Image (spheres, helix red, strand yellow):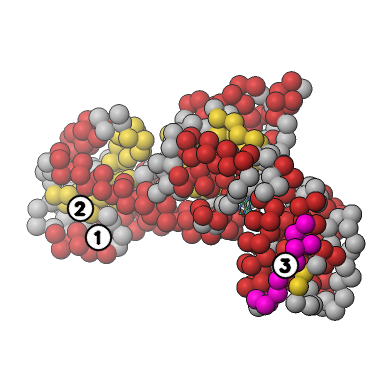
Amino acid sequence: MKKPYHILIVDDDPDVLTSARILLKQHFQKVETTEDPSDLNRILSRKNIDLVLLDMNFRKGRNDGAEGIYWLKHIRELSPSTQVVLMTAYGEVELAVKAIKEGAFDFVLKPWTNEKLLATINNALKLAREQQKVAQLQHSNKQWEDQAALKEEDLISRSPSMTSVLETLKKVAETDANILLLGENGTGKSALALSIHRMSMRKQEPFVTVDLGAIAPSLFESELFGHKKGAFTDASEDKAGRFESAHEGSLFLDEIGNLDLSLQSKLLNALQTQEIRRVGENQSRKVNVRLICATNSPLHDWVEEKRFRQDLLYRINTVEIVVPPLRERLEDIPLLARKFFERFCKKYNKESLSLSIEAIDALCEYHWPGNVRELEHSMERAVILSAGKEVKSEDLQLRGGQAAKPAGLNLEEMERHLVLQALDKHRGNISKAAKDLGLTRAALYRRMEKYEL
Ligand SMILES: Nc1ncnc2c1ncn2[C@@H]1O[C@H](COP(=O)(O)OP(=O)(O)OP(=O)(O)O)[C@@H](O)[C@H]1O
């Protein structure tokens, strides 16, 4: 199978162009040639070239390689992610070394052997892919980092319903099946998605998250599929979408119910063809991702109401898993409560604090509309607010219970407290919590980040 790369060969000798093209066409999806290096501007600004095979000497009679170095620098500036392999004549090794210092990946001596040329190009493309991965990791969002910080053994449960979910996940994680996680907010869907990735054969590859509940719908397409420079006002440079970032790894689409019908079609198309097209580009790119989706929306009802495409649902739910709400996992409540409590005691230097039995009973009786996330927040709040040695049920401030007065808090602590309260009230629904607090979603996100919520 041809590799999904786009290669450009630049040489003023038509015979060299022809023989290189014939060879490379057998191995790579797209191969273009030009005799004139000044075409580089036009080509690089319109197309995504993965690698340029560049001659060192263009004008007849000149063989100091200066022009090759000039064009090499030019390519590095115009398109830093494009790899450059130089073609040099015998006796120009010193020049080639200089070129490598200027950013060329490697050089091949003319006349080349096919094996050597292919091996050099493949190595350059492999490096480019690795560099991309590093860049993706560096750019990955905070949410990803939070999830990455969660260790597998952190996902704890002893309730029969959740244990059976975890067992099913273990079985399907290794396959490449697309998985749909259904369940209320805060039940642990994101944590499970990461756990699936970590148990899969793709675990060494990227795990990329797109939270469709946290970005503006107008940005969905470019976020998922990327864009070309100039495709819209804010597109100041070419950008790969999350699909490309997740190539060979897993893509987690959280709140998939937020996709409108036109994007549902585009997503379906991408899944069917395993190709995506960046916004503003004509050419498509091959991608290979394992898709994990999650939602608290009733997608099956939405199919009936024609709000969600049935064919897309069937694509994403090869395996469908319902994550039970916390109130149906009674055995998990004390287990998780203690775990969170210990974590926050450590964080706030209150390690002598304890959780009373009657507080645990109250936790077990509560209905947990915001599920594990609400329990986590309640434990944090209890640790922060408790003044004594032991947290009692009235310190828990469970909704419908007696609210403790958050006395003695400074302005920042008060703000954090209000943000937590609003998130709990709306079961982690950012839009509703923001509205309640009189903030924009972005302003609420900033505060959540500030207070590490
Ligand atoms: N079984 C578990 N053990 C330990 N921590 C858990 C468990 N389940 C969930 N959590 C924690 O609870 C919080 C909420 O979980 P998560 O974000 O995965 O829920 P979600 O279902 O994806 O929520 P939403 O639908 O709002 O995106 C996270 O901090 C997560 O680490």
Q: Residues within 10 Å of mark 3 (few under 14, many from 20)?
A: some
Q: Is residue 240 visible?
A: no
Residue 283 horizontal/vertical position (percent): 46, 33
- Asked whether the viewer can see residue 116, the reply is yes
Residue located 45% across and 44% down the image: 199
Q: Is residue 433 above or below residue 9?
A: below
Q: Is residue 3 above or below residue 408?
A: above
Badge 1 residue CB within 8 Å of ligand 1: no
Return the x and y of residue 123 as percentages of the image width and height. Answer: 26, 48
The residue labelled by disc 2 is: 107
Q: Which residue is mark 3?
A: 355
Q: Earlier in the sequence, mark 1 or mark 3?
A: 1
Q: Nearer the viewer, residue 384 or 313?
A: 384
Dot 2 amino acid type: Phe
SS at badge 1 = helix
Q: Is residue 354 magenta?
A: yes
Q: CA distance from mark 1 to mark 3?
A: 66 Å
> Image quadrant for the N terminus?
top left
**Number of residues whose C-alpha sits closer than 10 Å to that of mark 1, classed few (under 14), some (14–19) or many (20 or more):** many
Residue type pointed to by label 1: Ala
Q: Nearer the viewer, residue 46 or 156?
A: 156
Q: Earlier in the sequence, mark 2 or mark 3?
A: 2
Left or right: residue 129 versus residue 261 is left
